[in-house]
Image (cartoon, rainbow, N blue to C red):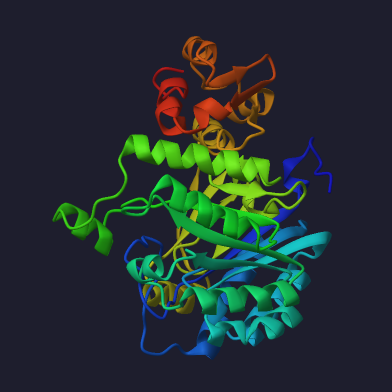
Amino acid sequence: MNPDKTNPDRDPLALYVHWPFCVSKCPYCDFNSHVRASVDQDAWRDALLADLAYEARALPGRRLSSIFFGGGTPSLMPPSTVAALLDAAHRAWGFTDDVEITLEANPSSVEAARFADLAAAGVNRVSLGLQALDDDALQFLGRAHDVAEGLAALDIAQAVFPRVSFDLIYARPNQSLSDWAAELARALALGTEHLSLYQLTIEAGTRFATEAAQGRLLVPDGDSGADLFETTRAITAAAGMPAYETSNHARAGAESRHNLTYWRYRDYAGIGPGAHGRRQGLATMRHKKPENWMAAINRNGHGLQIEDPLTPHDRATEALLMGLRLAEGVDLARIATLAGGTAPIDVAAARQIAAQGMLTLTDTRLTVTEAGAILLDAILPRIVLDPVTV
């Protein structure tokens, strides 16, 4: 796939589909997920198709290089709904020859039973929410499956889908460096091509945030978290699955092409409750609450709440913040083009940090080094200029 570098409006497009429903709400989760006693599946299929049709009219003449069903728990979607959306997307845009179609799935036996039907619908990559390979940890994280059930679902996924990834959460309370190293080694031995490895963070509005505020939940401190992060990167690199993004690790060629669209700041359409999009210099966001999104669909034929133009500075800044998460870094000429002139980078500060070994700055590229990766959140405010400074 070779996007037309001279005309970004002809680049392949990505599509994100948000399914907001879950069986239960995990205590660490701040995603747009909701528990409902029942879901009118026919109404939801029709509403998602209407939202997709709106985006297709807004972005004609493009082909889809990736589709991602996220949530929530999209493995709760009927496979017939997935098939209907893929058919509509194909008719609206067409697919590249190597289109990547990912669906996030919980590793329960009930959902694993749908994997073959989801593959038949067109899904060719699954991202499985294992989250831990320890039963006590899974109970702490509020997961409904145990390790045995999760590994059984992984076996089914690997037999059904051409590409498989799974998530793990580390830096859990009382998790030692040796415990995590052993768990990660076990994960790497399971034979997938991609792993998403996230440090446990306490997000506002979650049950864990309440427990932390009450002193009933303690997570590893900054130094311990840094040790866990560095160990994670060392072990995965040695296993041939280095970090290509802050929290994502893959064998060569197995990177998530859909997520690379975000990190490389290319156009993507987002449909479904709370879905964000970036298309042709516009920022889009759907109504977040499922009932509000559905009401907007019935009223307007789409679920949009926001469709606002981004300033050149906004676009350049977003591209920097996303792109510096990648091991490949950012192309400075492209950042300058997005900014309409000069890239919003404090060059003096960047050179100072580069001298400390945490950035690599050349005439053409800016990259965060392995030493700087753990400090990315601290580095970004020092080098990315605000609009007043530019």
Residue drawn at (34%, 61%), measured in percent from left and top?
A: 28
Residue drawn at (72%, 49%), measured in percent from left and top?
A: 251
Q: Is residue 199 left or right of residue 186?
A: left
The residue positioned farthest toward the left in the image shown: 214
Residue drawn at (56%, 78%), measured in percent from left and top?
A: 75
Residue 324 in view, yes or no: yes
Residue drawn at (45%, 72%), measured in percent from left and top?
A: 20
Position of 116 relative to 335 (above/below): below
Position of 45 relative to 305 (above/below): below
Tell which of 358 and 145 is nearer to you. 145
The location of residue 238, given as percent across then percent down, is: 66, 41
Q: Quadrant of residue 160?
A: bottom right
Q: Is residue 112 left or right of residue 3?
A: left
Q: How many marks?
A: 0
Residue 246 in view, yes or no: no
The location of residue 316, given as percent across then percent down, is: 55, 31
Tell which of 272 and 208 is nearer to you. 208
Tell which of 119 and 227 is nearer to you. 227
Position of 8 relative to 69 (above/below): above
Q: Is residue 342 left or right of residue 382?
A: right
Q: Quadrant of residue 193?
A: bottom right
The location of residue 189, given as percent across then percent down, is: 65, 59
